[in-house]
Image (spheres, grey):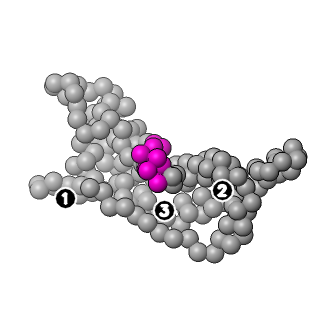
Amino acid sequence: MADDIQFSIIGLDALLGKIGSIKQETRRKTGRAALRKAANLVRDAAKQNAERLDDPATGRSIADNVAIKWNTKHFKRTGDPAFRVGVRHGSKVEKKGNPDEGAAGPTPHWRFWELGTEKMRAQPFLRPALEKNINPVTDTFIREFDKGIDRAIKRAKKKGGIA
């Protein structure tokens, strides 16, 4: 099971004041958009890390399969927005013979690189993508969320309503 990474942000009094003055729906939409932009930074770093592991002799590319996905289960369970950064296609190849389907074909071997095996040491590319980018990701989220809230408040004032 993967380890959860949690952290707290201190010093956001102005942003928290703005958050209190807008509707829940605006908060949710703006937060999701800001979180997507922050998750894209992690995705891009993971792709860059995966490129060093990809074998150019084969058509398969782990980097082409790194993607972000909205975490519906977490959102329904807790109400907190969450995106997952991972590798598409899961861990199995359903066709026998393991055909090479090109760059976006299944890459089940990504797990061996990330987690290692008893005969091969781990060379993670997903975990360091987040660990090395925590500050830029946090800054991006705060900046985008603040801009989105300001836009929503400005739009609501033009219409004469509440954001």
Disc 3 marks which residue?
Answer: 133
Per the model, the C-alpha gap separating discs 2 and 1 is 40 Å
Q: Could you say which is closer to the camera, residue 53 or residue 153?
A: 153
Residue 101 seen in the figure? yes
Residue 34 seen in the figure? no
| Mark nearer the viewer, 2 or 1 | 2
Left or right of 154, for residue 100:
left
Under tag 2, what secondary structure? helix
| Mark nearer the viewer, 3 or 1 | 3
Under tag 3, what secondary structure? loop
Q: Could you say which is closer to the camera, residue 4 or residue 124?
A: 4
Q: Is residue 59 magenta?
A: no
Circle 2 crowding by C-alpha within 10 Å: few under 14, some 14–19, many from 20: many
Under tag 1, what secondary structure? loop
Magenta stretch bounds = 69-78
Disc 1 residue type? Arg
